């Protein structure tokens, strides 16, 4: 019997202390929660005000933004980027491009290339698809090619071996 009374008293004291602890926790959370909500509503209102000011137009801020953005923009694309045919006038007058001469001659039904006095084997990286025009040119006329990637103009002409 004494054991049963001891168990009953331990159970009752556990219930009372547990209920007290639960009530204490509920009250402390309610107090903290009201303070947290008050703080968060003030923070939310301050953030809204900051965003309202950020949306207002300011010429100084626009100029500053444009200057910063310009540093990170890629260079604008150049017209006719790549390789294309040009006229003799463009070849002679445009000084922004280096000038080179490619002489082509046939020997034993094979084409041989001399670029600025140096024999070269492969001209496709220099002339790209314009080389097809040259191969189909039965009159063996001189033509001019601009390579923007190499910043060079080429005079392509037939030569004698």
Image (cartoon, rainbow, N blue to C red):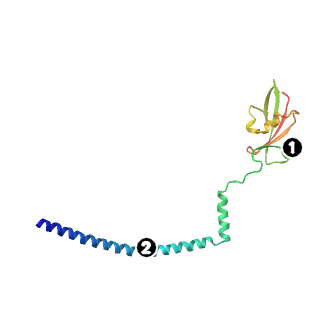
Secondary structure state at the residue bearing disc 1 = helix
Which of disc 1 and disc 2 is earlier in sequence? 2
Q: Is residue 144 above or below residue 37?
A: above
Q: Please state the horizontal and vertical placement of residue 43, each as a whole percent of the image.
A: 50, 73
Q: Residues within 10 Å of mark 2 (few under 14, many from 20)?
A: few
Query: Could you tell me which residue is drawn at 49 percent across and 75 percent down?
Result: 42
x, y percent for residue 26: 34, 73
Q: Quadrant of residue 9?
A: bottom left
Q: Is residue 43 above or below residue 68?
A: below
- Distance (Cα) linking label 2 and label 1: 79 Å
Which quarter of the image is occupied by the N terminus? Answer: bottom left
Residue furthest right as drawn: 139
Residue 85 screen position, x and y as percent: 82, 42
Residue 88, numbered circle: 1
Where in the figure is residue 127, as x and y percent of width and height? Answer: 77, 39
What residue is shown with label 2? 36
């Amino acid at each position: 019997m004494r054991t049963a009374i001891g168990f009953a008293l331990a159970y009752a004291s556990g219930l009372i202390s547990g209920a007290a602890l639960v009530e204490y926790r509920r009250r402390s959370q309610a107090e903290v929660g009201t303070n947290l909500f008050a703080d968060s509503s003030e923070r939310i209102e301050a953030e809204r005000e900051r965003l309202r000011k950020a949306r207002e137009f300011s010429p100084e801020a626009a100029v500053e933004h444009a200057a910063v953005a310009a540093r990170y923009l890629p260079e604008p694309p150049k017209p006719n980027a790549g390789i294309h045919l040009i006229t003799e006038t463009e070849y002679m007058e445009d000084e922004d491009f280096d000038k080179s001469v490619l002489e082509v001659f046939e020997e034993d039904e094979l084409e041989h290339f001399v670029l600025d006095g140096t024999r070269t084997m492969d001209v496709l990286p220099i002339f790209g698809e314009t080389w097809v025009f040259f191969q189909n040119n039965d009159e063996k006329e001189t033509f001019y090619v601009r390579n923007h990637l190499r910043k060079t103009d080429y005079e392509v002409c037939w030569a004698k071996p």
